[in-house]
Amino acid sequence: MRHRKHNHLLGVKTAHRASLLANLSCALIENGRIKTTLAKAKALRPTIEKAITLAKKAHASDDAARKVHLRRLAIARIRNKKAVKKLFDELVEQFVDRNGGYTRIYKLALPRLGDAADMAIIEFVDDAPKKKAKKKKKRTAKKVAVEKKDDSRGDDSEASEPSGESSRESEEVVEESSESEPEAKTEE
């Protein structure tokens, strides 16, 4: 009896489903994160986690024959030798201390335009931290003009020298901000 043996069928035949999951697994291993439908992401999770478990067993094993055997089992599942090599040699180091739960699925807010399918991002949990974009500080010409007026009020000759330097710096800031503004417009 096949009670409680659930598979994600994805509405395709068995060979198509196996090929689809192998290709998605390969893409996830190579890129670290992929954007796909929610149903495919949920179907991919058990497949990729079993492959990572095979890699962990091979990493822990001292027997060369067992390592080869586990690698061949992963090749049968993923069907791409380069992806299996990357999984067994590089990615397995991230998951040595983790007992399952190697992937994370984010459900995206907007559905796909063509068929309104729910979209998701699936990624490895211990992926490298993402770099945050730096916020650009834009100075307006008004602030620079105010700074020039404040610097010109100084009575001492020593105070006037730094004000000259700051006015040169403020002119450079105005030039830099005027150069960066057209770039921001072209990106939109």
Image (spheres, grey):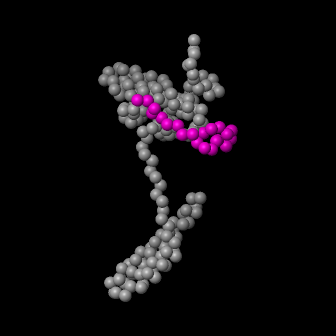
> Magenta part of the protein: which range?
99-119
Residue drawn at 45 percent across, 27 percent down: 51
Q: Can I make out residue 131 in this image?
A: yes
- Give coordinates of residue 155: x percent, y percent: 37, 87
Question: Of all residues shown, which one is farthest toward the right?
Answer: 115
- Give coordinates of residue 36: x percent, y percent: 58, 37
Task: Work out whether 47 lies above or below 173.
Answer: above
Task: Work out whether 184 lies above or below 144.
Answer: above
Q: Main secondary structure of the magenta part?
A: loop
With 75 as the anchor, is 64 left or right in this view? left
Q: Which quarter of the figure has residue 59?
A: top left
- Give coordinates of residue 113: x percent, y percent: 67, 43
With 110 as the anchor, is 74 left or right in this view? left
Residue drawn at 33 percent across, 24 percent down: 61
Residue drawn at 45 percent across, 32 percent down: 101
- Residue 49: say if magenta: no
Question: Of all residues shown, which one is farthest toward the left?
Answer: 62
Image quadrant in which the N terminus is located: top right
- Give coordinates of residue 80: x percent, y percent: 48, 30
Image quadrant in which the C terminus is located: bottom right
Residue drawn at 42 percent across, 32 percent down: 87
- Residue 105: say if magenta: yes
Q: How many labels does the image show?
A: 0
Q: Can I make out residue 90 in this image?
A: no
